[in-house]
Image: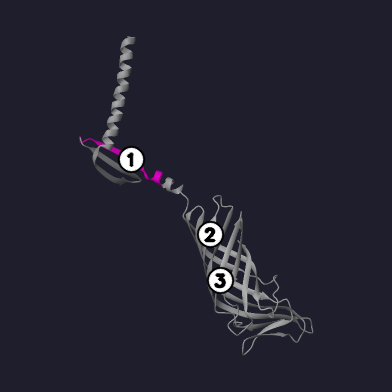
């Protein structure tokens, strides 16, 4: 009895191995393949040279989960710039006070990520220039020949500034470390002026607060262009903008270039 059992077991193993090999050869030695979908499953039929069919079922859900595990190639969303403005160039121009010369901006960005260490970010948004003067009694006025700066007759000025808004387009190639803890990007931007005005605040003899506005553009240039740089360390990202163009229209104001820097939220 033991002898018969020992003979039968090897025969069963050989038989199962033969079926397995036959199944594989049936699949790979096929002459014709038919593929169709049934509900959420792809069905593939292999027909071999002997006329036998082999059926294979592939769930589309498996393919979906596999594609989801791959890194996204792009991202988009809104960001906010919170920074300050200053200008450089003409020493005779009024000094600008950093605190209060805010540079807010709201941007929509689309970022293409061809690799882990490089991405290309494009942004479209609106930004505001605010230049607050150190001399609070110095008022900027629109003259016939251009912008003029005069001392207010009240002598009690508390705030004086000029502002302008721009619609901007920026392209920013960026490199970053594999873990994403450090990034650096630099690229060009250009903008078109949307509006502008001057504002002066002073105290009258009754100590009431009075505001005066110079409505309309304060001879700020219609077009701006320059270079933007962004540096990211951990969760903090800083930006710097430098305008290559002059801040004011030609022969309408001091020869200055705007510089802005701050945080990206």
Compared across the picture, whether 115 is left or right of 207 comes to: left
56 magenta-colored: yes
Spot occupied by residue 98 in the image (x, y as percentages of width and height)? 69, 71
Q: Is residue 27 left or right of residue 257?
A: left
Q: Is residue 103 left or right of residue 171?
A: right
The answer to the question of whether label 1 and label 3 lie on touching residues, with beta carbons closer than 8 A, is no
Q: Secondary structure at mark 3?
A: strand
Foreground pick, 83 / 228: 228
- Tell me what residue is drawn at x 28 percent, y 26 percent: 18
Q: Which residue is mark 1?
A: 57
Out of 25 and 258, give the one closest to the viewer: 258
Residue 147 place in picture, x, y as percent: 64, 85
Question: Gap in Å between the C-alphas at discs 2 and 3?
Answer: 17 Å
Residue position for label 2: 174
Residue 23 is situated, as x and y percent measured from the top left of the image, at 28, 32
**Residue 27's x, y, as percent?**
28, 37
Asked if labels 3 and 2 touch by Cβ distance under 8 angstroms, the answer is no
Q: Which residues are magenta?
A: 50-63
Label ID, residue 226:
3
Comparing labels 1 and 3, the label whose residue is closer to the camera: 3
In the depicted structure, whether residue 53 falls above or below residue 117: above
Near mark 2 (Cα within 10 A), the count class, few <14, some 14-19 or many ≥20, is many
Q: Dividing the picture into quarters, in which one does residue 218 lie?
A: bottom right
For this rendering, which residue is in front, 175 or 122? Answer: 175
Q: Compute the Cα span from label 2 to label 1.
A: 44 Å
């Amino acid at each position: 009895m033991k002898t018969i059992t020992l003979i039968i077991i090897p025969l069963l193993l050989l038989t199962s191995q033969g079926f397995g090999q036959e199944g594989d050869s049936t699949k790979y030695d096929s002459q014709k393949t038919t593929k169709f979908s049934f509900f959420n499953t792809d069905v593939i039929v292999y027909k071999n040279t002997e006329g036998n069919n082999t059926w294979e079922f592939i769930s589309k859900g498996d393919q979906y989960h596999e594609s989801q595990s791959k890194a996204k190639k792009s991202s988009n969303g809104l960001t906010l710039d919170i920074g300050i403005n200053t200008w450089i160039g003409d020493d005779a121009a009024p000094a600008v006070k950093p605190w209060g010369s805010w540079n807010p901006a709201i941007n929509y960005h689309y970022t293409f990520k061809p690799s882990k260490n490089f991405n290309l970010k494009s942004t479209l948004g609106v930004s505001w220039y605010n230049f607050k003067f150190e001399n609070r009694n110095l008022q900027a006025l629109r003259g016939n020949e251009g912008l003029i700066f005069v001392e207010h007759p009240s002598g009690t000025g508390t705030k004086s500034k000029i502002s302008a808004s721009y619609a901007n387009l920026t392209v920013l190639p960026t490199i970053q470390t594999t873990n994403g803890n450090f990034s650096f990007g630099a690229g060009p931007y250009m903008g078109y002026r949307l509006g502008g005005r001057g504002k002066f605040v002073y105290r009258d003899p009754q100590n009431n607060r009075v505001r005066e506005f110079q409505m309309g553009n304060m001879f700020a240039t219609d077009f701006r262009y320059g270079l933007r740089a962004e540096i990211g360390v951990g969760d903090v990202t800083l930006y710097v903008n430098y305008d290559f163009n002059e801040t004011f229209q030609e022969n309408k104001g001091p020869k200055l270039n705007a510089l802005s820097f701050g945080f990206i939220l």
